[in-house]
Image (cartoon, grey):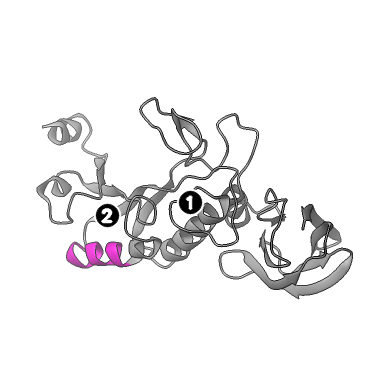
Amino acid sequence: ELNELAHSIDSTRLTTMATVTMCQPDDEINAISDVLSYNHYFGWYGGNVHMYGPWFDNFHKKFPNKAIGISEYGCEALNWHTSEPEQGDYTEEYQAYYHEELIKQISKRPYLWATHVWNMFDFGAAHRTEGDRPGINDKGLVTHDRKVKKDAFYFYKANWNPEPMVYIAGRRSVNRVKPVTEVQIFSNCAEVTLKVNGQIIKKMQPDGVKVCIFKDIRLKKGENNIEVSAENGKRVITDACCWIL
């Protein structure tokens, strides 16, 4: 009835609806609106992050004339860190990995009419008792108080903002326990140079989703100064942080 009412008020506008994982592609409810999107959290509440592409391919194959998109996707992150991120661990490293994998899959599927990150900011949710405090949904790319932009925020900035930038991921993981680590950089520049304790380690070109991963980087005991730079015409863009082993 609501769909028919919307069409009667303005026949030039398409109706749309967000549905959820529990609804199968051929469920009757999915046929109501002109346009459809799904709230999926593969890789957070269940399944794994690699399920998105095949799931939407299957839907598109069954209903090639139905506009399909992603109305919500995301996972939660706190100022928690690990060198071995896993689903459900609330680390910034897993959140960044999750979004990197999603963008890879989304970019290969132009039939998706729209996709929406959930969420820009951590937000209040009185019924939740997850993460490190009750009443907060931590899926934001920015903290609830707007003071900290998480690593995943800069991943999207590298991909969506044309302003040249470099960013060292994992920067808040200051106290390190392993002498050999990897350094992940988000950048929309053509080439990135990594320095560790003043020494040039390597130059690398970002991949298709604006990520560089420098592997097998050895840290010394005590403070380690991590620096990255990229040239943009006559301008040199830099970022730096300090890790302690």
Give whichever of discs 2 and 1 has the lower sequence position.
2
Residue that protrudes farthest toward the right in the picture: 198
Amino acid marked by disc 2: Ala
Q: Is residue 60 magenta?
A: yes
Q: Badge 2: how crowded within 10 Å, few (<14), some, or many (20+)?
A: some
Position of residue 158 in the picture relative to residue 54 (left or right): right
In percent of width and height, residue 192 lies at 75, 67
Q: Nearer the viewer, residue 152 or 187?
A: 152
Q: Which residues are magenta?
A: 54-63
Q: Quadrant of the N terminus?
A: top left
Position of residue 79 in the picture relative to residue 20 (left or right): right
Residue 67: mark: 2
Give the residue displayed 67% in from the left and 51% down from the top.
Answer: 173
In percent of width and height, residue 110 lies at 39, 63
Q: Is residue 172 magenta?
A: no
> With respect to residue 126, does 171 lie above or below?
below
In percent of width and height, residue 17 lies at 25, 41
> With respect to residue 92, does 16 lie above or below?
above
Give the residue displayed 33% in from the left and 64% down from the top.
Answer: 51
Residue that protrudes farthest toward the top in the picture: 126
Q: Nearer the viewer, residue 110 or 94?
A: 94
In percent of width and height, residue 2 lies at 15, 31
The residues tagged by marks 2 and 1 sit, at their Cα atoms, a distance apart of 34 Å
Amino acid marked by disc 1: Asp
Can residue 205 be seen in this snapshot? no
Give the residue displayed 42% in from the left and 37% down from the top.
Answer: 130
Asked if labels 1 and 2 touch by Cβ distance under 8 angstroms, the answer is: no
Label 2's element?
strand
Residue 89: mark: 1
Q: Nearer the viewer, residue 61 or 148?
A: 148
